Image: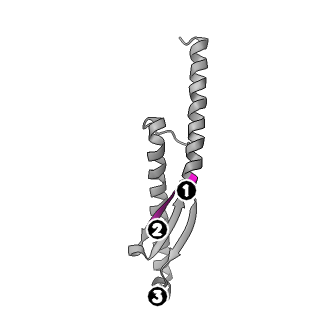
């Protein structure tokens, strides 16, 4: 069984972990990744908070007038950026989570 001292230590470590996670969240918000599609015709920039910051579309693609292709490329580049953001989050947090999948942290 756990003693009161053990519980105090557990709570202390939980608080330290929470502080580290908050610091990482703040740092990740300032780090960016790029998702691309169409060989770079569409580029989407996202941050480690999984927020889309910028979308760049090559003028050549716009001049083609193919709206369906443009929409598909934007979706593809956005998904690529969000997947890369998730990978960055997992990489940044794996040291403190020891590789555990802790849903809802980010």
Residue occupying the point 60% across, 24% down: 11
Q: Can you tell which of label 3 and label 1 is closer to the viewer?
A: 1
Q: Earlier in the sequence, mark 3 or mark 1?
A: 1
Q: Is residue 55 left or right of residue 80?
A: right
75 or 32, which is in the foreground? 32
* The magenta segment: 29-35
Give me the residue at 56% from left, 38% from top: 20
Q: Earlier in the sequence, mark 2 or mark 3?
A: 3
- Measuring from the top left, give residue 16's x and y in whole percent: 58, 31
The answer to whether residue 106 is left or right of residue 38 is: right
Looking at marks 1 and 2 on the same chain, the residue that comes earlier in the sequence is marked by 1
Q: Which residue is mark 3?
A: 64
Question: Which residue was labeled with disc 2?
Answer: 77
Tell me the distance, in whole angstroms, between the alpha carbons under discs 3 and 1. 30 Å
Contact, mark 2 vs mark 3 (Cβ under 8 Å)? no
Distance Cα–Cα, label 1 vs label 2: 13 Å
* Residue 87, image x, y percentages: 44, 51
In the image, residue 94 sits, relative to residue 28, either above or below, namely above
Marks 2/3: CA distance? 18 Å
Q: Secondary structure at mark 2?
A: helix
x and y percent of residue 40 in the render? 41, 74
Query: Mark 1: which secondary structure?
Result: loop
Give the residue pinned by disc 1: 50
């Amino acid at each position: 069984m756990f003693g009161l001292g053990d519980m105090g230590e557990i709570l202390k470590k939980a608080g330290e972990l929470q502080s580290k996670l908050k610091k990482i969240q703040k740092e990740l918000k300032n780090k960016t990744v790029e998702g691309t599609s169409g060989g770079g015709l569409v580029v989407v920039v996202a941050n480690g908070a999984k927020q889309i910051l910028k979308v760049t579309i090559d003028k050549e693609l716009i001049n083609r007038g193919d709206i369906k292709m443009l929409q598909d490329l934007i979706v593809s580049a956005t998904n690529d950026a969000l997947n890369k953001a998730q990978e960055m989050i997992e990489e940044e947090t794996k040291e403190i989570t020891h590789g555990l999948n802790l849903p809802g942290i980010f």
